[in-house]
Image: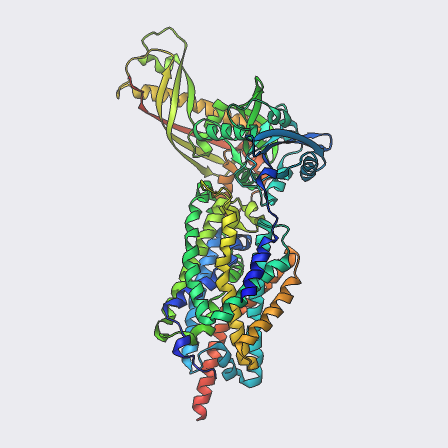
Amino acid sequence: MKWLIVCMLLLSGCVQPRILERQGIITAVGFDKKGKLYEGASVMLSFQTTRSSLSEVIEATNKTSKGVRQDLEAQTSHDLGSGQIRVIVYGKELAEKDGIFTLTDTLQRDANIGALVYLAVGEPNAKEIVKSKKHEDTRDIGTYLYRLIEKNLRTESLLAATLHEFIHCYYDVGKDPILPYLSVRNDKPIVEKMALFRGDKFVGTVRLDESFYIKILASQYKSGLKNITVSRDDVAPLLINKKTKKVNIVINEIKTKRKIKLISQEPVPHFRVTVKLQAEILEMSEKMKPIMVTNVHILERAIEKQMKKEIEQLLNKLKAYKTDPIGFGQMYDHSVRALQLTDKQWYKLYDNAKIDVDMQVSILRTGTID
Amino acid sequence: MMKTPNERLSINAYLVFFLIHTTQIGLGIVGVQRVIFVEARQDAWIAVLLSGLWIHLAVFVIYKTLTLTEHDNIFSLHTFVYGRVFGWIANALVIAYFLMAYTSILLGYVEMAITWMYPDFPLWGAALILIVLTVYALYGGGFRLVAGVSFLTFFMTIWIVTLVVQPLKYAEWIHLQPVFEATPTQMAKGVLKTAYTMLGFEVLYVIYPFVKEKGRVHRYAQLGVMLTTFLVATVTVIAIAFFSPKQLDVTIWASLSMLKIVKLPFVERFEYILIPLWLLVILPNLLMFMWAMTRGGKELFRVKQKYLLFIFAFLLYVVAIMFEKRATINEFTDQVGYYGFWLSFVYPFILYVFVRIKKWAKGSAK
């Protein structure tokens, strides 16, 4: 039996070894399209024995994304490894004209790439984002973008999609993906907007304060702060100074319960959206009377009214873009028996769908003062 | 008739639980979700439960068949029922099935390991490692080792189940709605497709003579089956919630793709641990089927199991390295599932009736 053990030990050496110093670890990739060719830019991180790690951006152009990869290999003495890709940025033009599904498909096919890679859209193009030199204290731009998205997803109104979630939404009938929209300010990539998709094609953007509502309707993450502008009349009983026209209130979302229900199918799909939002007040532009049990409802109703208005505006905007990031179509498909909804049918129905919004806000706290 | 093995070679009844369960769980559970989902859509999990129910019944019938006469394993039962010549052919078919099952598990695992971890590793090398491992284990240990291995690997791998908590974060339970939408035909097809994953309980036909406390075998066999059904149903429910329908339609190893989400502080790509660990899950399968093969071969050819081990190993290796493409492996696995379905889900009921008739005929002839 001894020779058997020897044989096994020898066979286990058959797999190619990977030496850390010879690896070029890709942390971020950007894709653009020029004519018929893909332009790719990768951030490569390499480790040295003597110095600390080094990051470098390499670029290539080819007909396919794996071809780009091949051309990239030609430009470096390191073995490129894609197992640590954190963020993939698609140029706005590429996402708008060609769609990005074929590119994401390649990624998913590759077992090397984790499912938790974040996807994003870059403006004006992906190259500019990836080539940016400013990345705070992180080692490379890939890690910076990853942390930027991760942090804003956890605590702010940003919605993000990992590779898995993007493909999930893409395949799901009646739900469209939504990705962060990166732009450059003072040479530094930031997130200001969200990119809306129809299928895998970029169709438009919404501001972060609008995406707050998409987030409270569609995801379980915390949505962070929200600035609400209510009209003076709505909160009149609370005001001390009665001259100003608008009052700005900043609330912080604590807990949200949402429920989307299909009430009727005919003649047009009719949904009722119920949102129960618990919040605390962080800032008011106007001095108000102390908020008590007796008068807090005035403030709550005023915020509800404004939020309802804003949600309805947002829903109309989404309808105009023909995109459904909240997943009404998914709800429709799964609520109706024996129905195989197709995307085409849904967009037609979606356009006429009636969506009632029922907003219930309760203010739990007002900070350390009333 | 086969001699009842002596005390030294037999095992305790509780080990039947591990033997049945670990032989049932193998490669199927890694990718079963898509296969059933394609047929029964969001009601796939119901198909799994129905299939489980059927297996409980089948195990009951197998047990009854084995206790009916003094013939306590499938090979001597066949000779008893069909006579010498036809019994021989029936036994050869059973052995051929074990051979196919072994090959499909071997190829399935190798293919998975190659796709996920070592794209440039040759199929012949991987197949060789696994076959040599099987031969090595069985040459030294025999049946008691198979039982021991299934006992150990069960505890070494059962904790993987707790990992499904992580993918649950991304679950959309609405995918399960509406329930009971599948038509009876779809459901029946779903049950049929579950067969490949749930196969393995038929080894009860072979291991029964080796158990000490015959009275408690049935209970433990049923418990093993119950756990399998529960696990398969769980991963199916989670996969339906985790993937969108069209995505699941194209995902080959749904369980693995799901566990890609798992991220521990010290290892980010969990599948790199999971795939080597899966060898422990399929090892009892490989050992069990190989052992069953040689046991049957002993009846058939009157040759020592030791020599048969080498002969079958060589044969399996030659068959295995002929496969190359995923599509052919897939087709082969489907075939195995299909034969396995007839042999394990349908045939026990027929055999039971035959044995009864034969027994009655013999009794009245006297």
* Vertical position of residue B208 compared to residue A89: above or below: below
The answer to which quarter of the image holds residue B320 is bottom right
The answer to which quarter of the image holds residue B221 is bottom left
At x 35%, y 71%, the residue is B216
In the picture as drawn, the residue positioned furthest to the right comes out as A35
The x and y percentages for residue A107 are: 60, 41
Whether residue A155 is visible here, answered yes or no, is yes
The x and y percentages for residue A187 are: 58, 19
The x and y percentages for residue A94 are: 66, 30
The reply, left or right, for residue A220 in relation to residue B38 is: left
Q: How many marks?
A: 0
The reply, left or right, for residue B47 in relation to residue A101 is: left
The answer to which quarter of the image holds residue A46 is top right
* Vertical position of residue B63 compared to residue A100: above or below: below
At x 29%, y 17%, the residue is A369
In the picture as drawn, the residue positioned furthest to the bottom comes out as B366
Whether residue B36 is visible here, answered yes or no, is no
At x 34%, y 7%, the residue is A241
Return the residue nearer the eye: B365 or B281: B281
Q: How is the image coloured?
A: rainbow
In the picture as drawn, the residue positioned furthest to the front comes out as A50
Quadrant where the C terminus of chain A is found in the figure: top left
Return the residue nearer the eye: A46 or A220: A46
The reply, left or right, for residue B110 in relation to residue A59 is: left
Return the residue nearer the eye: A252 or B158: B158
* Vertical position of residue B291 compared to residue B354: above or below: above
The reply, left or right, for residue A231 in relation to residue B247 is: left
Return the residue nearer the eye: B216 or B185: B216
The x and y percentages for residue B258 are: 50, 46
